[in-house]
Image: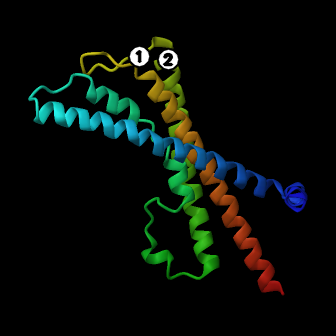
């Protein structure tokens, strides 16, 4: 353990940020995974109620929206490489060119979309909380404001993980440059 602590104190900001973003993404991914259990239970109750007893529930749709609307696992999906990528062109590129292309795409597409999306979600969540907004569908007027808060947090986590990915790309480019100089 002593050696690990010494390594952590020598780790640069980039390494500490990557570790922090990865930990946040791991935790949010774990929470998202555990939320699948009640989501499946609610779906099963609705399916049995509708198809076996011919008596659909009035609350299942709103509940599923609340449980599944958080998209908490996005940061974890990015961290673990589960996000959709189009590697047909970039996989044929050399490592340095691949890193540069990824950096450009993160700068031009990913960051503006996630930062803008997080900003809009936060604004929307603030308004929703101030009104204690509820779903207009379903019979029980489920509160939607908690889901909007979780969506905002999810986009912040996704943005943090994207920044960690950018730092990793820069580190790979620097390592490749050092190797080329030796």
* Up/down of 181 relative to 153, above or below: below
Residue located 76% across and 78% down the image: 177
Residue located 43% across and 61% down the image: 84
Residue located 50% across and 13% down the image: 130
Q: Nearer the viewer, residue 63 or 153?
A: 63
Q: Is residue 109 visible?
A: no
Residue located 77% across and 53% down the image: 16
* Up/down of 154 relative to 4, above or below: above
Q: Is residue 111 left or right of residue 170?
A: left
Q: Nearer the viewer, residue 31 or 100?
A: 31
Q: Residue furthest bottom?
A: 182
- Helix, strand or loop for disc 1: loop
Rendering coords of residue 54 (x, y %): 8, 29
Label number found at residue 129 = 2
Residue 14: name its quadrant: bottom right
Q: Is residue 75 left or right of residue 168?
A: left
Q: Is residue 33 left or right of residue 181?
A: left
Discs 1, 2 touching: Cβ within 8 Å: yes
* Up/down of 55 relative to 162, above or below: above
- Helix, strand or loop for disc 2: helix
Label number found at residue 133 = 1
């Amino acid at each position: 353990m002593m050696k690990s602590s010494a390594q952590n104190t020598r780790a640069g900001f980039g390494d500490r940020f990557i570790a922090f973003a990865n930990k946040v993404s791991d935790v949010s991914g774990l929470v998202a995974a555990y939320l699948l259990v009640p989501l499946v239970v609610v779906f099963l109750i609705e399916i049995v109620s509708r198809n076996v007893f011919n008596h659909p529930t009035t609350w299942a749709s709103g509940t599923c929206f609340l449980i599944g609307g958080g998209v908490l696992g996005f940061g974890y999906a990015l961290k673990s490489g589960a996000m959709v990528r189009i590697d047909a062109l970039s996989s044929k590129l050399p490592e340095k060119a691949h890193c540069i292309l990824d950096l450009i795409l993160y700068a031009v597409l990913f960051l503006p979309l996630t930062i803008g999306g997080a900003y809009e979600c936060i604004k929307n969540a603030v308004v929703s909380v101030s009104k204690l907004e509820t779903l207009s569908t379903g019979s029980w007027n489920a509160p939607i404001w908690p889901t909007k808060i979780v969506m905002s947090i999810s986009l912040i986590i996704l943005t943090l993980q994207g920044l960690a990915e950018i730092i990793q790309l820069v580190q790979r480019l620097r390592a490749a440059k050092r190797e080329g100089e030796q």
